Amino acid sequence: MPNRFVFRQVHFEDLPTFLADGEIRAKNHLDPQRCHQCSYQDIVNRRGTDEFQVSNGCVVNDFVPFYFSPITSFTFTIYKENVPLVSPDGIYLRQACENDRIFLVGSPQAFAGSGLFTCFSDYALNSKAPMPTIETDLNKLEQHVHWTVFDEAPMVAAIPEIGYPGVCKWYHNLATPPERMTRSAKRMAEFLVHDAVPLDKIVCIVVKTDAMRAAVGGMMAASAWDIPILTQRGCFYG
């Protein structure tokens, strides 16, 4: 089985919160973290309902979501500054931009036998067209996710330090061939971790510039953690 990786993009100023808590918490956690919000509120609200069938009677907001690559239609729309950035107090600050975003990177394989409940989808959990389905068996990861839209050339965003080979540069839908009509939704398949992700499951943090690496490095030095920080501009658009 190929060694797969998962990516969670966050606002860099929220990293000290995760470092202090030792974990990344789900939106519906009993003790939620005060973080910046960078999302479309209508989608967030729908993920708090039973619109999408998640295991164990949960809703999507009971989980911490990751994606299977850093290059998706959502990270692109952040790059285009189409998504609002809202403070932990609910105040609109400005439009989010990718220069302030960092990736927390993990591996699905690291969750096997951990006691943490995980599941994953075959399509984005933001639409019913096509309707996503959820799988809980990590042994079925290669069969459930549409890896062809991730693994075909041309590839970008490789992270050689951790063995990530990158992802196909293209993620948008095309009229032909048929399998590319839903490519965008396939590329936003999600890996979900119930309740919280311990930071020992994060293999590295990826940033866009050395200046951001220095800023994040200062946050790391002030904490009890020592997660590798890698500058990899290819994981971003600009």
Image (cartoon, rainbow, N blue to C red):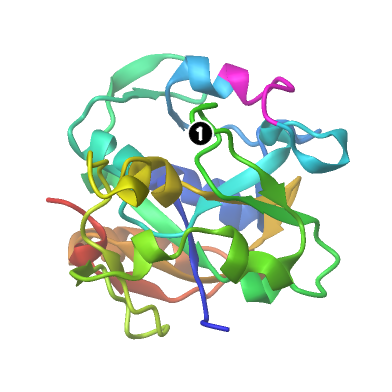
Above-or-below relation of 200 to 215: below
Instruction: Please tell me which residue is depicted at 23% across the width and 45% down the height of the picture.
Output: 176
Q: Position of residue 235 (x, y in %)?
A: 26, 61
Badge 1 amino acid: Pro
- Closest to the observer: 134 or 205? 134
Q: Which residues are magenta?
A: 45-52
Above-or-below relation of 5 to 55: below
Q: Residues within 10 Å of mark 1 (few under 14, many from 20)?
A: some
Q: Position of residue 126 (x, y in %)?
A: 51, 29
- Closest to the observer: 194 or 11? 194
Of all residues, the one furthest to the left in this rendering is 238
Query: Which of the image's four quarters has the N terminus?
Result: bottom right
Whether residue 51 appears in magenta in the rendering, the answer is yes
- Closest to the observer: 153 or 191? 153
Q: Quadrant of residue 143?
A: bottom right
Q: Answer yes or no: is residue 126 visible.
A: yes
Q: Please count the marks in the image.
A: 1
Magenta region, mostly helix, strand or loop? loop
Residue 113 is left or right of residue 69, and the answer is right
Q: Position of residue 43 (x, y in %)?
A: 51, 21
Whether residue 231 appears in magenta in the rendering, the answer is no
Residue 219 is left or right of residue 231, and the answer is right
Instruction: Please tell me which residue is depicted at 72% across the width and 73% down the height of the picture.
Output: 139
**Disc 1 target residue:** 130
Instruction: Please tell me which residue is depicted at 31% across the width and 58% down the height of the picture.
Output: 215
Instruction: Please tell me which residue is depicted at 64% across the width and 36% down the height of the picture.
Output: 33
